[in-house]
Amino acid sequence: MAIVEVKMVSGWAVDLATLKPLVKEEENGIRRYEVDKNGAIQLYFDSLGATQKCFTLEVNQHTDVKNAKPAVVTTYDYYKTGE
């Protein structure tokens, strides 16, 4: 199982209503998702191979933040998070 974790830009949040349809789209491979208390999104895939995966997260700005840092996207194996 693979996870793609998206840590949002300060002042922005994912539109939760748009996450459920992502899970229903079989071609993107997303099996489920979680959103933590800080607003980071974890997308769970059965696997990520050499085939490109493409999906869009819709986000909304809720606070104007000056000098906001870029979002961070990390991909890792669910069973090997410490490597």
Image (cartoon, rainbow, N blue to C red):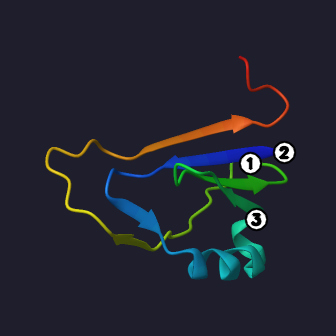
Quadrant position of the C terminus in the picture: top right
Query: Spatial distance from mark 1 to mark 2, Cα to Cα?
Result: 8 Å
Q: Which of 60 and 31 is in front in this view?
A: 60
Residue under the point 56% across and 65% down: 54
Disc with the residue nearer the chain's start (3 vs 1): 3
Few, some or many C-alpha atoms within 10 Å of disc 1 (few <14, some 14-19, many ≥20)? some
Percent from the top left, x then y, of residue 11?
Answer: 31, 58
Residue located beneath label 3 in the image: 29
The three-letter amino acid code for the residue at tag 1 is Leu
Query: Which residue position is annotated with label 2?
Result: 1
For residue 16, which quarter of the picture? bottom right
Identify the residue position indicated by label 1 in the image: 48
Is 55 on the left or on the right of 44, as rendered?
left
Left or right side of 69 for 35: right
Looking at the rendered structure, the kind of residue marked 2 is Met
What is the quadrant of residue 41 in the picture?
bottom right
Q: Residue at x 23, y 46 (%)?
A: 68
- Real-space CA distance between mark 3 and mark 2, rounded to the nearest whole angstrom: 11 Å
How far across and how far down the image is residue 26, in percent? 78, 76
From the image, which quarter does the N terminus lie in? Answer: top right
- Under tag 3, what secondary structure? loop
Is the C-beta separation of discs 3 and 1 under 8 Å? yes
Q: Residue at position x 36%, y 61% from top? A: 12
- The nearer-to-camera label among 1 and 2 is 2
- Image coordinates of residue 49 in percent, x first then y, are 74, 46
Q: Which residue lies furthest to the left in this view?
A: 66
Q: How many angstroms separate mark 3 from mark 1 (CA)?
A: 8 Å
Tell me the SS state at disc 1. Answer: loop
Farthest residue in the top direction? 83
Q: Give SS at disc 2.
A: loop
